[in-house]
Image (spheres, rainbow, N blue to C red):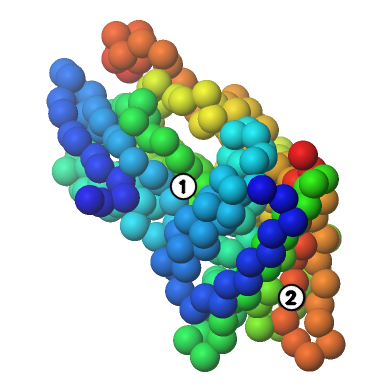
Amino acid sequence: MTGETTELTLPSRIDTVATAAAAVADFVGRSGISDDAAFGIDMAVREAVTNAVLHGNRQDDEKVVEISLKSSPDAVEISVHDQGPGFNPETVPDPTAQENILKTSGRGIFFMRTFMDEVDWTIRPGGGTTVRMVKRR
Amino acid sequence: MAELNINERQAGDVTVLDMSGKITIGEGSVALRTAIRRLLEEGKKRILLNLAGVSYIDSSGIGELVSSYTAIGKDGGQLKLLNLTQKLQDLLTITKLLTVFDVYESEADALNSFK
């Protein structure tokens, strides 16, 4: 199937990561994308939602994570929006630099960039960060 | 069913943890952390993680592997990895952690390496 759009609104809890991943897997399964691409999308979505829950919304139960899924003949596009203060991804250290290899965190954005073809962040004027990720077919 | 199942067995003075499921943020990562802490408290410092049944790991799970590796090393012990799936091997390669961990495909070779 191509040309489908789905929106999800989920609470700022750790278990949202698994819920979102399952919903995205269903969506991606219907989109007809390859298994390898689906694996990469799953990795990237889990990391993006983890960041939204932990670092964006800081597990505040008054805030939600919104996820938008779009498939087209050319690509699958996923946006994850949080209601946090926003951040600059360029300030995140390279986890593969020698001095960071043994750090216990900081690999999420690296995985998102590795597994998706496009990743960009937008800080909305009203607050919150949207990360948009594209996987081309 | 738990997200991550861990079965402990002893092979000489090496503790083998046969793991199956997912090492992801939340339950899976916590289960690994709890198991490693308990082994260190029991004085078991030679630990082999058999990851053959681990179908999935995220950045949190990889962070937990690193945390386990450094905690055991600081305690004078050794952590080694056995039977990585291709996906996990790929993830450790791109994060440059494959050069950090001692990784084996044969349990006998892994156990011998502790001696």
Which residue corresponds to the image point at 59% horizontal and 48% vertical from the top-left? Answer: A30
The subunit letter for the residue under badge 1 reads: B
Question: Which residue carries the number 2 mark?
Answer: A129
Looking at the image, can residue A100 be seen? no
Q: Is mark 2 on a helix, strand or loop?
A: strand
Q: Measured from the top left, where is residue B115 in percent x and y? A: 30, 13
Quadrant for residue B40, please give it: top left
In the image, what residue type sits under mark 2? Thr
Q: Nearer the viewer, residue A106 or B25?
A: B25
**Numbered label attached to residue A16:** none
Q: Which of A51 and B67 is in front in this view?
A: A51
Q: Measured from the top left, where is residue A16 in percent x and y? A: 47, 68
Which residue corresponds to the image point at 80% horizontal and 46% vertical from the top-left? Answer: A73
Q: Nearer the viewer, residue B4 or B109?
A: B4
Question: Which residue carries the number 1 mark?
Answer: B61
Task: Tell me if B53 is positioned left or right of B42 in this view.
Answer: right
Q: Measured from the top left, where is residue B20 in percent x and y? A: 30, 36
Is residue A27 placed above or below A57 in the rendered structure?
A: above
Numbered disc total: 2
Q: What element carries label 1?
A: helix
Q: Distance between the residues labelled 2 and 1?
A: 25 Å
Task: Tell me if A49 is positioned left or right of B33 in this view.
Answer: right
Which residue corresponds to the image point at 81% horizontal and 82% vertical from the top-left? Answer: A124
Q: Measured from the top left, where is residue A131 in percent x and y? A: 74, 65
In the image, what residue type sits under mark 1? Gly
Quadrant for residue A14, please give it: bottom left
Which residue corresponds to the image point at 56% horizontal and 86% vertical from the top-left? Answer: A63
Looking at the image, can residue A63 be seen? yes
- Disc nearest the viewer among 2 and 1: 2
